[in-house]
Amino acid sequence: MKLWVTAASIVLTGAVRAEVLLSEDEIQKTLSFGPWPPIVQSDPSNRVSRDSRAITLGAALFNDPVLSVDGAFSCASCHDPEQAFATSEAQALGRVLLDRNTPSLRNLAGLRWYGWGGKSDNLWAASLHPIIEEQELAHSKESLKTAISESSYVSDYETIFGSIQVQEPELVLVNTAKTISAYLETLGTERTQFDDFRDALERRDLAAAANYPAAAQRGLQLFLGRGNCVLCHNGPRFSNNEFHDAGVPYFLNETEVDEGRFGGLNFLLSSAYTLDGDWSDDPDKKGAWAVRSVRRSHSDFGTFRTPSLRGVAETAPYMHDGSLIDLDAVIRHYSKIDAERLHADGEAILSALNLSEREIADLVAFLATLSKVP
Amino acid sequence: MGSETQNAPAVHVAAAAIPLAQPFSILVTICGETAVSEVRVDAIMPAHQHGLNYAPKVTAISDRLFRVDDMLFHMPGLWELQVNVDFNGRSVSYTSEIALK
């Protein structure tokens, strides 16, 4: 009996140690993905950021078709709260079938760029553009002012911003967008199994860390190592918030391309609604350095913003055009990526990984732990 | 920083911990007596064949001390910091490697 107990202890001890598979260097890299949730500051460019009245109004407007010119859509029609603020369609369906996949709206507070092409440098501008975009909510500034004035929200609006009748339509548009932004700032993904693992590693609690599945650990090792995923998917949001060519075709048809970041920068640099513009409420223009100093390059063509991987298992399909149906397809895309499709004058960071079936499954297992329910 | 130019005045760079994918600033100090007319700063990742996505902003604090803002390294790995200093019409290039985790 004594021999049995001794043997069991050895096996148990060995098992606990063996189940933390990461090297010390990998552990240090893993710590950089947290802590979660991050501390988010109020947006100085939006005077109603963190204002509870604005958040409430923004949430109501987000879900109400009053923000579309004909009452046909609301923001929530494409950014469905029941589907992680995205939809399961490959490409968004506005008034026409749009070119891109609907991005989730969680964890958006404090980013440097918004949208697949980064055409906005702040969240209220990113909220504003779909309201007046012809293929989306299609309001004019004037029709929006009329719609808000005649809606049940007018008293809430005026409580926050004063009399709407004396305001220029463009001011009503910006104010409305800033309430939407105040609401969106509150949307975040919750802590996950990965965060428990990461925090246990930080505490040096290897017994707790060992609860993290071995397959997910192996996937994380690939993510950090041979997969090179961490080159772009880094930091607590698993995104460097910059723009890359992921080898996904960007031809829309025989004659048109999705310009990606190239088009996003053209839009941004002609926009009145940037952190460097007069509609920002921040006298210090904090954050405007990016729009002032961003470089333009021919290789921006067909590059797209690195999406966050927080909650990624909940937001299929994937890539800027929604062309990959699930995470398994995404990993297989990178495993067999066609280098001929990458920019000849672009960055040289992707090559076919030629992953084994187990490695593909391990990476999917890791990514699944970045969502609340793997 | 290193330079391939013979007898180039020494250049030193000071930076706090460099954050990944977040803006940071550095200080460039140029030694010697030769007048400095301009300082330009850039960086590349040689292995990845790309540079900075943002143009660094150089501000003279004194004749020989320069503050560089709007630097952003958007990927982990080995970066090569490049500083070009114009001394009375003669341009001298300096480089320094920075490994970012």
Image: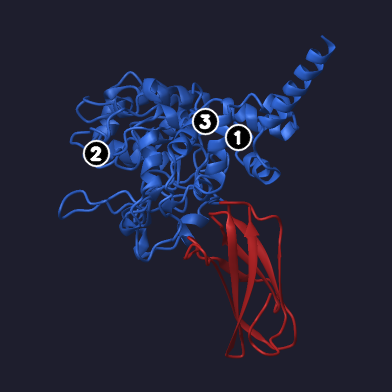
Circle 1/circle 3 CB separation < 8 Å: no
Q: Which of marks 1 and 3 is in front?
A: 3
Q: How crowded is mark 1: few (under 14 residues within 10 Å), some or many (20 or more)?
A: few
Q: Which amino acid does label 1 sit on?
A: Pro
* Chain A: drawing colour: blue
> In the image, what residue occupies the spot 46% across and 60% down?
A294
> In the image, what residue occupies the spot 34% across and 61% down?
A343
Residue A346 occupies quadrant: bottom left
Q: What residue type is labelled 2?
A: Ser
Question: Are the residues under badges 2 and 3 in a single subunit?
Answer: yes
Left or right of A352? Residue A35 is: right
Q: Which of marks 2 and 3 is in front?
A: 3
Give the residue at mark 1: A38
Q: Which of B70 and A150 is in front in this view?
A: B70
Looking at the image, can residue A118 be seen?
no
Question: Are the residues under badges 1 and 2 in a single subunit?
Answer: yes
